[in-house]
Image (cartoon, coloured by chain):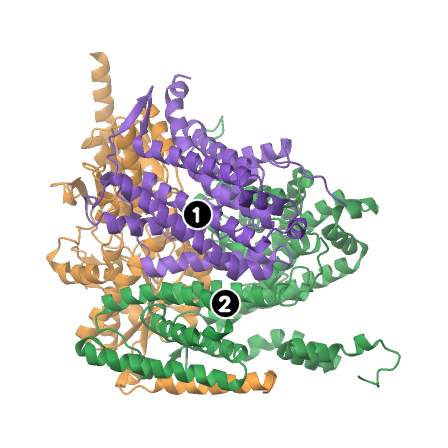
Amino acid sequence: MQAFLSQMPQQIVNGLTLGAVYALIALGYSMVYGILGLLNFAHGDVFMVGAFIGYGVLNVFVPDQTPLIPAVLVIVCMMAVTMLGTGIIGMAIERVAYRPLRNAPRIAPLISALGVSFFLQNAILLTQSARYRDYRTQFLISPRLGLDIGSAHLSLTRALVIVVAVLLMIALTYFVQRTRLGLAMRAVSIDREAAAMMGVDVDRVILTTFFIGSALAGAAGVLFGLVFGQIYHFMGFTAGLKGFTAAVMGGIGNIPGAMLGGLLLGLIETFAIGFISPTYKDVIAFVVLVLVLLIRPSGLLGVRAPQKV
Amino acid sequence: MSKPNLSHIVKLGLIALVVMLLVGNASGSASAQATSVKIAIMGPFTGNAASVGQEQLNFAKLAVADFNKTSGMNVQLVEVDTQLDAAKAVTGAQSVVSNNDVLGVVGPAGSQEIEAISPIFAPANIVFVSPSATRTSLTENGVKVFFRVVPRDDVQGPTDAMYMVTALKAKNVYVIDDQTSYSSGLGDEVEKTLKGLNIPTERDSITQKDTDFSALVTRMKGASPDVIFVPFQLANQAAQIAKQMAEQGLKATLFGTDGDFAPADFIKAAGGATEGAYVSFFAPDIHGLPNAKNVVSAYQKQYGDFGSFGGPSYSATTILLEAIQRAAKAGTPTRASVLAEVAKTNDASSILGIPIKFDTKGDIVGASFFIFQVKGDNFVLVPGAAVPPMSATTSATMSATMNAAVSATVSATAAQ
Amino acid sequence: MSLEKIGQDEWVAQVEARRQKQNPVVAEITARWGRLPRVGKIILIVLIPVLLPIFVQNDYILRVGGLVWLYAVLALGLNVVVGLTGLLDLGYVAFFGVGGYGYALLSSAQFNIHLPTWVSLPLVTLFTAGVGFMLGLPTLRLQGDYLAIVTLGFGQIFVQLMTSMNRVGLPGLSAPINLTGGPNGIVALDPLHFLSLTMHSVTSYYYLLLLTLALVLVAIINLNRSRIGRAWRAIREDALAAEAMGIPTNRLRLLAFAVGAGIAGFAGCLFAAWQQSVFPGNFDVPLLITLYAMVVLGGAGSLWGMIAGAFVITVVPEVLRPGIQLLGIELQQIVFFGGILALLAIALRPRWRLFAVLGAVILSGIIVHLIAAALFPEQITGGTNLITAWLTIPVNTTTATSVGNFLFFIVVGLFVLLTQMPARWRDPVLVVALYLLAFVWQTRLSQEPSTTVLLLTGVALIMLMNYRPQGLLGQRRVEIA
C-alpha cells in the first residue's frame, strides 16, 4: 500500500503524458470515422511522418547543440510546419485513396488505407534509413527543469506536452462547436445526404476533417518526439492501434469521447505497468476495454444511435 | 482510334518486354560473363527490427564489395527479407535452396527463424552463418550446416551475473527482457544464476515496440535495485530507460549486453544519462580497432553510424566468402565444398579483433566476454574484465563458492 | 440489337455489348471463359494445380503453391465470418494460433504427448471451434466496429499469452512451468501421419493442402447454398430485418464464429506440422492484415475470390522478390517498368499519346544528361547499361542517394497532383514525373529491393481498390442508405 501511494502521483503524471499523445491520435480516428464511417488505418503512419517532419525542422534550427533561434520559437516552428505538412498529406490521402471509394462496400477503404500505410512506412524507411532518430530535446529544454509535486517529478517537457495537447483539444472543440465549418462537419457526420441537400459542400468538409485530423496526428508526432526522444519508421503501427483503441473506448465518432478515451488509456496502461505487471500491460488494457464495452456497448461517451429500419 | 482490347494489350506487353530485354542487356562491359556465384543474406530489412537488419545488410554489402575487389571474383549478394518472422524466413529459405547459384547464407538474425529453417537448409547441405543468434539450443540439435560468430546465452548469462555480484556488488537486481528469443534467453540465464546466489531478483518484460518506460521506471523505484539488467536488441530502448531514470531520480547501474553496444543509440541518444553504465560484449569495439579502420570509415561515410550488429555481420560474410574462395581453388565451388571450408575456418585476426575458429557444433572457439563502461562519448574497456566463458562445471563450482562467500558476508553483516 | 435472342428482354440481351464497352479486357476474358465447355473449365481449374508438381520440380514454387492453398483455406474461413455474415473479426489469426499451438502441445516434447494425427487433428479443430463459440458469446451485444476492437483485443491477448506463458508460476509449484515455450516457441513437432504415410516433403504438403482446400471449398459451397448460408447473408445485409423475419441471429452468429474458427484451427494444425514449429510471432497482426487483404482483394463474399485473393497476395511479393532474374535482369525491374508501361498504355489513348509521352521522356533525359555533362563533367557516371547511361547519375554515391531521396518525395507529389490536374497540364507533368521516377528507381529503389517490394505492394493495393472496389471476383453491391 505504501508503494502504491508513493508511486501514484508519478504514475499519474506518466499516464497523463502518454494519454495526451494517445488522445490527439484518437481524435483524428474519431473525426474521420464520424464523417465517413471509415477506419483510417493509415492514421498512425501520418503520426509517424509528422514526427519525422518535426525532426527535419529541428535539424534546420538546431544543427548541432545550440538552437539558432530561441527554443520556444523552434518548437512553435516545428509544430506549425508539421501540422501544415501532415494536414496536406492527410488531404492528399483522402483524394487519392478514399474519395474514389466513397460508395464502395465499407471494407474496401480499409485495404486502400493499408496500402497507404505500407507506402508511408516504407517511404520513410527508404529515404530516412532504419536508424532511430533522436529529438535531442535536452538541447531545447533542459531536462532538469521541472516541478516537484509531492513524490512526482513533472518535467517541463511533459508539462509542455500535456498543456499543448489540451490547448489543441480546446481549440478543436471551439472550432467544432462555434464555427460554421464546424457546424457543417457536425451536420455531415449526422447525415451526409441531408447536409448536401442543405447546401453544405460535403467534399470540402471531408477534406477539412482530414486536414484537421491529420494535423492533430502530426502535432502528436512532434510532442511524442519531444517527450520520448526517439522516432523510427515503424512507430506508427503501435500508435495507430492504441489510438484506435482509445477512440473506440470513448465512443467512436465522438470528439470528447476520443479525448477521454485517450487520457484513460494512457492512465490504464501506466497503472497496469506500475502496479500489476509490465509484461501483461496490453492484456490488461484490452480486458479493461472489453469490460467497458460490455457495460456500455457504444463506448464511454458514445450515443446509442437508434437503428432506423 | 482503336479501343484497347485483349490482343492489343498482349501485343504491347510483348513489345515492351522485348524492348526492356534489349535495353537491360545492352551492356558493353563484361559484367554478364563473370562467374555467377551468389551468397544470400537473410534478415529483418523492413519492419520493426529494420535498424538491426539494415545494419547487417549494409555491412554485408560492404564485405562483398571489399572481397570482390581484393579477390577479383564477382560474388553477388541476394537479399532475403524475413522481418524477423519465422514463416517469412521459411519461404525465403526455400527460395534460397531452390536458387542453385547460392552457395551459402549469412543470417538469419533471429533464433526462432533459425529453428524454423533448419529443416530446410539441413537436407540441402547449404551452410548458413548467423551473426546474431545466441540461443543455446541452436548448436545442440545436431544440425551440421549451422555456424555462428557470436557466443551462446548459456555462456554470457552466468558471466554477466557473476560480474554484477562480484565487481558491482549488487544486492538487488532488476532484470528486464524485450520478449525476443535473445533477450528472454539471456534474462533467464542471469536470473537463474542470481537466484542460485540468493540475490533477490525482479523480472519484467517490455516489447520491442515500446517507447515509453516512465511507468516501469516508477515501478522500479519501488524495488530500489542496485543493478538493472537490460539485455535488449534495440539499444535506444535502454537509452530511453536511462533518460527516464535520470528524470525521475532513480539511481541504479544499468547493465546491458550485445545489442546495447551501440554508441549512437546507447550513449548519444541518452544525452549523458547512460554515463557509467556497463555493457558486456563478446568482442572489442570495432570503432577503435586498427584492423577495422577502413571498413568503419567506409561504412560511416556511406551509411552513418552503427551499433553492434554490423561487425559480426561483416565477419560472417567474410568467413563465407573466404570459404568460397578456398573451395574455388579446388574447382568449381559447390554447396558441399563451401560447407567443408567454412568448418575449417581459422581466422587469426578478423575484423572483430578476436580469432575465429569453429568447434564441431558450430560455435566459435575460445570466445570471451569484454565488459565496457560508458565514459563520455565512448565505450571504455574495463581493464582485467575479459572473462573467459565458463563450462557448466566451472560455473557450478564458481557459483557454489560464490554462494558460500556471499552467505558468509551476509551472516557476518547480520551478526554485527 | 440482337434478334436471335427472341423472347429475351432487350436490356438483358445487350449485356455483352455493354460489358465490352465498359471494360474490354475483362469482358474478353469473361466471354472466352463462358464459351469454354465444361470440360475445359474443369481442366483449367483442377488439372493445372494437381499436375503442377509433376511438371515443376522446383521446391520453392511448390512451397509457394502450398502457401497459396493454406492461405486460401484461411481466407475461406475468414470469409465465412466477414464476407458471408458481415462480422468484422479482427482476432481471426488467434484461432489459427490456437490450432497451431494446440497441435504443437499434443505432438511434441513440450509435455511429451504424442497423439496420433487422426486423434489430434479433429480434437484441435473442435477445440478451436469451441473457442470461437466462446469468443462469440460476449460479442453478441456489440455492433460493427466495437466487435472489431474486442476481437482485436482477443488476438493481441492470445499472442501476449503465448509469448509470456513460459514462466507460469502457480501457487503450490516450486518453480514456474513452461507452458508455451515463450518467444522460443515449440519446436521439433511430429510430422503428420496418415495411415502409413508420413508427410515430410514439400510436395506431400502441397497435395495435402490442396485437398484440404477442395474439401473446405465444397463444404462452404454447400453451406452457402443451404438455409444457413442464406440466413448468414441475410444477417450481413440487415441484421434487424433478419431477426424480424424469424432468423435466430444470435445462434447463427455464434455458428459463423465457430465454423470460421474451426477452419482456422484445422489450418493451424497443418501449418504447425509443415513448419515443424510454432512461434507467437506466427500469429500476430501482420498475418491478420495479409488475410484481410486477401479477402477484400478477392471480393468479400465470393468463394472463388478467396482463392484469387490468396493467389495474388502470396504470389506478387514472391515475384517481386529480389534476386530472381529473368534472362539476366532482375524480375523486380521487369515488373516495375512493365507495369508502368502497361498502365501508360491503358491510360493514354489514342495510341499516339503514349509514344509522344515516351518519346518526350527519352528526349528530356538526353537533354538533362547533356546539360549536366557540360556543367559537371567529372561528376556524372558513364553508366554500365543503356538506362544508366541515359540517366544523369552522380558518381558520388552519397550525393546520388540524397538527391534520390529528395526526388522521391517530388515524384510522389507529382503523381498525386496528376490525379487532380486538369487535362491540359497532365502530359507535360507526366513526362517530368516519369523521368524523375526512372532516376529515383535507379538510385534508390533498385538499391533497396526489400523496401521497394513493400512500396510497390502498397501502391498496388491502393490502385487495385480504386480500380475495382468490390474485389477481383466480388459482386458490385448497391448500398441502399
Question: Three-letter amino acid code at disc 2?
Answer: Thr
Q: Is residue B108 visible?
A: no
Q: Which chain is orange?
A: B
| Residue B90 in the figure: left or right of residue C199 | left
| Residue C262 in the figure: left or right of residue A78 | right
* Numbered marks: total: 2
| Residue C234 in the figure: left or right of residue A223 | right
| Chain A on-screen colour | purple
Q: Residue at x 68, y 49 (%)?
A: A194
Q: Is residue C128 visible?
A: yes
Mark 2: secondary structure: helix
Residue B409, image x, y percentages? 21, 21
The answer to whether tags 1 and 2 share a subunit is no
| Chain C on-screen colour | green
**Residue with the mark numbered 1:** A215
Q: Nearer the viewer, residue C309 or B223?
A: C309
User: Label 2 marks which chain's residue?
Assistant: C
Q: Residue furthest right?
A: C7
Q: Residue at x 46, y 44 (%)?
A: C181
| Residue A143 in the figure: left or right of residue C10 | left
Q: Nearer the viewer, residue B182 or C112?
A: B182
The tag on residue C224 is: none
Rendered image quadrant of residue C19: bottom right
**Residue with the mark numbered 2:** C419
Residue C171 sits above or below residue C381 on the image: above
Q: Residue furthest top?
A: B416
Residue A30, image x, y percentages? 54, 43
